[in-house]
Image (tube, rainbow, N blue to C red):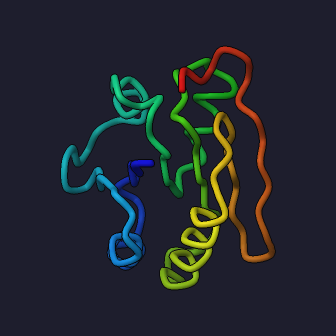
Amino acid sequence: MRLLVDENMHRVVVARLRQAGFDLEWIRDTSSGATDDEILARPDIPTLIFVTHDRDFGDLIFNKARTAPYAVLYTRLPHRLPNLTADLLIAQLEAGVPAGQMTTIKRDGSRTRPFPDGANNG
């Protein structure tokens, strides 16, 4: 599964994900400055796992009925901990990412929440 990584993710996280063998596109490299709505309007968004620090994506998907990615990995770890963030993301990706859900990753674990009906095209 291909990852779309928000430009707000630390470069160390992106490098670690690539080193771990994940196929990813970093928005900072390909469409820096894209708005949240532009990201969710991409024609390929239903096929991507979106990785972000931005909680606004949850609001757009759950409350404003925007098209959802295949899944969202939302990390709530501080930017000053990129190696821990990368470790937890890699562990989650290797364990499997549930389709049609937003997974919130914190130091003490993760929780998933299914997207509302009709939000996911994947």
Q: Is residue 103 left or right of residue 45?
A: right
Q: Who's the residue at 29% across and 50% down the image?
A: 27
Q: Is residue 85 left or right of residue 15?
A: right
Q: Identify the image quadrant of residue 17.
A: bottom left
Front one among 85 and 70: 70
Q: How many marks?
A: 0
Q: Residue furthest left?
A: 30
Q: Residue furthest top?
A: 118
Residue 120, how many percent across, how many down? Answer: 59, 24
Q: Is residue 49 left or right of residue 72?
A: left
Q: Who's the residue at 53% across and 58% down the image?
A: 53
Q: Who's the residue at 70% across and 30% down the image?
A: 115
Relative to 103, does residue 58 appear above or below in the rendering?
above
Q: Identify the image quadrant of residue 101.
A: top right
Residue 29, how many percent across, how many down? Answer: 19, 56
Q: Who's the residue at 78% across and 41% down the image?
A: 113
Residue 40, how many percent across, how many down? Answer: 43, 29
Quadrant where the image shows the C terminus:
top right
Front one among 25 and 77: 25
Relative to 61, does residue 97 appear above or below in the rendering?
below
Residue 61, how many percent across, how many down? Answer: 61, 28
Relative to 56, does residue 88 appear above or below in the rendering?
below
